[in-house]
Image (spheres, grey):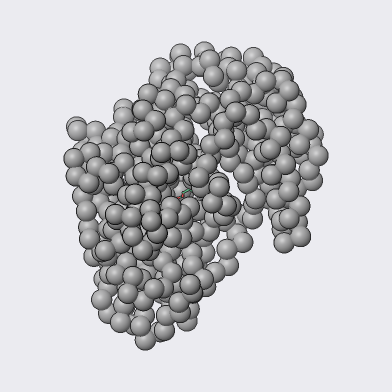
Amino acid sequence: MHVNVSPVTISSLRAALNGRVIEPNDDGYDQARAVYYGGFDRRPAAIVRAADAADVAHVIKFARETGVELAVRGGGHSNAGHSVSEGGIVLDLRDLCEFDIDVEGRTAWAGGGLTAGAYTTAAGEHGLATGFGDTGSVGIGGITLGGGIGFLVRKHGLAIDNLLAAEVVTADGELLHVDEQNHPDLFWAIRGGGGNFGVATRLRFKLHPVDSIVGGMLCLPATPEVIAGFIAVAEAAPEELSTIANVMPAPPMPFLPAEQHGQLILLALMAYAGDNEAGNQVIDRFRALATPLADMIQPMPYSAMFPPEEGAEEATAVARTMFIDTVDQATAETMVEYLESSDASMRAVQLRVLGGAMTRVPVDATAFAHRHSKIMVNVAAFYEGPDEQAVREAWVVEFSQALLQSDTGAYVNFLQDESVDRVRAAYPGSTWNRLREIKAEYDPTNLFRLNQNIPPANG
Ligand code: FAD
């Protein structure tokens, strides 16, 4: 159902709010409706930059009463364009960016619209960190509610494994304090269930002493032997080390020899959260796989893993996310063959070896059900225009099918706008049923539906 909302109705909303309301004729409208990925040129009736939880509650009430589509925006990085609506209201949380740290207690309350980079920099000033993902501009709300797999995943688990509490405005406009004792069912659901259950205005996290790490970028030539070897070494490494390996044509980066540009490389981002000397010894095992094309791994503050992203170009991309069990020689050969067979301006397979702390949380303790998945894989290609989109889409689908092994799960935060089956893959078996029951309790009319949607039970 598509419900239009008139400017008169919007002005009644404007009067009730502390934050700014941006309509199509207002300055800054185009900037305010832009999201990270290209291809989502949607024109909302208004963007509300909420100033506080009361604003969030007002907007939710407004959406419920008018029936207008509601998009919730944190960092704006949804791969599916879920943080902007055509004709609806965008509830923009960017101004909810407080950071209130208890250094001695090693916890922090953070606003639901804070970015992972801002959080990491602020916590890093005290030698403390919580792991989110690999990109500073991602919002802590979106990444945490879906799980959160980043540079500390093997050492300190998923972002949700460090979530202690949240303040959530539910579909009825009520602000709830949610933790293990209060609304434990909702606390279970928001740890993996995404934005289906309400808007998190504040989140409280555990912090860990992560002062200096050994980290940065290592580039190796991407032969099948090196790819399979890299994964084997990463799997055998102590859990202090988390890695993200991208196999892709080398971009024209100044630190890579010109003759490498366009050739397949393995560009790895690595973080060893432990003793520097031990870290260096572990990284040496990767350096021994082949003569590095670039080696920027060094001791650094953890926050240096999130450099400024100014000037990043808007990309339109198709992608598939999945888990696999192993990268043997044959699998690595398949990767090289597919990457060499495409002429997309950018194409990549990203490999993240999981394990460690994330596996020690029981599968049914949260709504993230992939605790024992071994390796997360993201296949992606850039495109320009609809004709090319279809070609790239076919390529990512075929490539991901060629890689499929026994694990049929998917990580919700990397899904695009795909199918119900793919959302089910993110929430297998009893996780799905339990989420639907909790959805029926907290959002029976499916107000929060512009997301990887979990329909209410009996809905
Ligand atoms: P938005 O588009 O603003 O939000 C996405 C959805 O999350 C919204 O539609 C809404 O449903 C919900 N949401 C956001 N904030 C709130 C809130 N406070 N309360 C309720 N609902 C909310 N994921 C990883 O796990 N690890 C990574 O390393 C990683 N790297 C990434 C790198 C890039 C460049 C990109 C684009 C994505 C990456 N992701 C990663 C995926 C990312 O976690 C998801 O796209 C996530 O949803 C982005 O959150 P956001 O707040 O930035 O996005």
In front here: 111 or 365? 365
Picture coordinates of residue 143, whole percent (x, y)? 43, 45
Q: Quadrant of residue 364?
A: top left
Picture coordinates of residue 297, whole percent (x, y)? 54, 26
Query: Taking 199 as reference, is 50 above or below it?
Result: below
Q: In the image, is 187 to the left or to the right of 399?
A: left
Q: Quadrant of residue 331?
A: top right
Picture coordinates of residue 180, whole percent (x, y)? 22, 38
Q: Which residue occupies the extreme bottom position in the image? A: 8
Q: Quadrant of residue 129?
A: top left
Residue at image position (38%, 50%) is 436
Residue at image position (28%, 51%) is 202
Q: Quadrant of the C terminus?
A: bottom left
Q: In the image, is 353 to the left or to the right of 160?
A: right
Picture coordinates of residue 193, whole percent (x, y)? 40, 46
Report the number of discs: 0
In front here: 388 or 213? 388
Residue 214, visible in the rendered structure: no
Residue at image position (58%, 67%) is 41
Residue at image position (22%, 53%) is 176
Q: Which residue occupies the extreme front position in the image? A: 458
Query: Taking 324 as reference, is 347 above or below it?
Result: below
Query: Taking 7 as reference, is 134 above or below it?
Result: above
Q: In the image, is 183 to the left or to the right of 89?
A: left
